Image: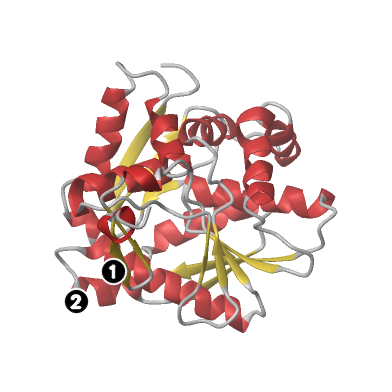
Amino acid sequence: MNSEETNSIAGNGCEILVPFNERKPLEEIEKGLTKTYRKHIWAKFIKAINDYELLKDGDKVAVAVSGGKDSLLMAKLFQLLHRHSKVKFDLEFICADPGYHENIRELLIDNCNYLGIPLTIYNSGIFEVVDKIAKDYPCYMCAKMRRGALYSKAQELGCNKVALGHHFNDVIETTLLNVLYTGNFSTMMPKLKADNFENMELIRPLFYVDELYIERFTQNAGIWPLNCACMVAAKKIGNKRYEIKALIKELKKNFDDVDKSIFRAATNVNMDAILGWKQGENKYSFLDIYDKE
């Protein structure tokens, strides 16, 4: 078993990814992000921010930290960027505690202290509510409620943006989920305007970062992230996203860069070769323009 493999321990409704490397000094971890992982993490983080204009002068960003590997990495990247960026922006690191077990909450705090992340935790009680109203499909409701809780806290702190740690693999998995299970072609966007919170925007700066390198960085740094701390979903056995993840892994055995092709498909939609599309509340058919050409 090499240093890039992980073990896991289950308990209290969650799985904790256990690294096989001991913790490294914070200075070494930070240097690794801009040196060892410069190409696969740091450069792609910066590229997404520049390509999609995720940061502007005067922004105040609420960085959402759940305790998982993705959000911990994102928080650290934002800290490093804040030190060196020509763009002047402020940060708040927040966690909407949905009802973590005490041991899980302590682990989250310990990880943030280890990484030098000044985290603000506040209780949201989401797990309890979701367990009552959405036992059969908890993940969707939990995500929706968490986002609302994050927006509210971000607004209270004077932030105009909330950053989430969704990465490249989340994007392509969402694309395939929509195609195969809902019959529509739509993907995860790098930024969105909040529906019910004025002047609030959601951004995803890990949009280009492959999960593989997030895992490698986390394991080599000796970080113990949470894989899933949900007390409700822990009672379920698998979900569709895991099936899609396995499908993509299988496809990659026979199709080179199939994951990149799925990603690019959302940037290369040929409007002359689709049967229909939707924009806002309006639906269109190719027949609407066929006779006009």
Query: Quick check: 97 left or right of 173?
Result: right
Which of the numbered marks, if any, corresponds to residue 141?
1
| Mark-to-mark CA distance, 2 and 1 | 9 Å
**Callout 2: helix, strand or loop?**
helix
Query: Could you tell me residue 152's position as x and y percent?
Result: 51, 80
Query: Is 121 left, or right, of 178 in this rendering?
Result: right
- At horizontal 35% and vertical 56% (from top left) the residue drawn is 229
Return the x and y of residue 5 as percentages of the image width and height: 43, 24
Label 1 Cα neighbours within 10 Å, binned few <14 / some 14-19 / many ≥20: some
Q: Residue at x 47, y 70 (%)?
A: 96
Query: Which quarter of the figure has residue 234?
Result: bottom left
Q: Position of residue 120 (x, y in %)?
A: 59, 70
Q: Give me the disc on residue 207.
A: none
Determine whether the residue tagged by mark 1 lies in a helix, strand or loop: helix
Mark 2 is surrounded, within 10 Å at the Cα level, by few (under 14), some (14 to 19) or many (20 or more) other residues, namely few
The scheme the figure's colours follow is: secondary structure
Contact flag, marks 2 and 1 (Cβ < 8 Å): yes
Taking the image as drawn, is residue 232 in sight? yes
Image position of 196 (left or right of 199)? left
Mark 1 residue type? Met
Against 147, is 246 above or below?
above
In which quadrant is the N terminus drawn?
A: top left
Residue 263 lies left or right of residue 178; in this view the side is right
Question: Residue 19: percent from the left, percent from the top?
Answer: 47, 32
Q: Mark 2 points at which residue?
A: 133
User: Toward which corner of the image does residue 289 lie, by quadrant?
Assistant: bottom left
